[in-house]
Amino acid sequence: MYAGAITRNPDAFAALFTEDGVFEAPLVPGARLTGRTEIRDGIAAFQSGMPGAVNVAESAYVLHETQDPDVFIAEIDTVLDAPDGRRTTMSLVQIFRLRNGQIRHLRDYFHEPIPPDRTP
């Protein structure tokens, strides 16, 4: 979360993955990135369109352990503060599969946040 959403550092985010790591977002058509270079470039492109800064104090997460020590699930509600002061929330569920302490596969279920000016 820190390397990806908060600092928006695609190099740091990609470094969390194994060389052959996979990032996929099943709810986003065509969002399957393989290898650190693709992950870095894909995350950089996505982050360039994020509608605001992460509000760490208002964001929340819950981690769920599984019987497999290399698999865990995160539920995240990321609060984004737009430059004009409006706020929106992006909710995610992420399934992590690790190898030797690095992410070998991250499945990220999310929809892009609704911009504050289009919130119903």
Image (cartoon, rainbow, N blue to C red):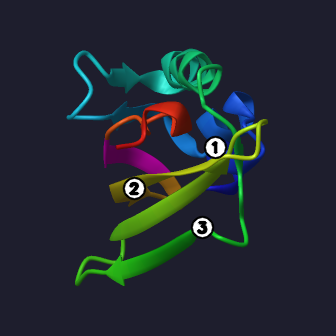
Q: Which residues are magenta?
A: 103-110
N-term-proximal mark, 1 vs 2:
1
Q: Is residue 107 magenta?
A: yes
Secondary structure at badge 1 equals helix
- Residue 48 sits in quarter: top right
Q: Amino acid at mark 3?
A: Ser
Q: Could you say which disc has been placed on residue 41 in the image?
A: none
Residues at marks 3 and 1 touching, judged by CB atoms closer than 8 Å = no
Q: CA distance from mark 1 to mark 2?
A: 15 Å
Q: Could you say which disc has been placed on residue 59 in the image?
A: 3
Question: Which residue is identified by label 1?
Answer: 4
Secondary structure at badge 3 equals loop
Secondary structure at badge 2 equals strand
Residues at marks 2 and 3 touching, judged by CB atoms closer than 8 Å = no
Q: Residue 80's x, y, as percent?
A: 63, 49
Q: Nearer the viewer, residue 70 or 11?
A: 11
Q: Nearer the viewer, residue 71 or 61?
A: 61
- The residue depicted at 51 percent of the width and 25 percent of the height is 39
Q: CA distance from mark 3 to mark 1?
A: 14 Å
Q: Which tag is nearer the camera, tag 3 or tag 1?
A: 3
- Residue 110 sits in quarter: top left
N-term-proximal mark, 2 vs 3:
3
- Which quarter shows the N terminus? bottom right
N-term-proximal mark, 3 vs 1:
1
Q: Amino acid at mark 2?
A: Ser
Question: Which residue is identified by label 2?
Answer: 91
Mark 3 surroundings within 10 Å by alpha-carbon count, few (fewer than 14), some (14 through 19), many (20 or more): some
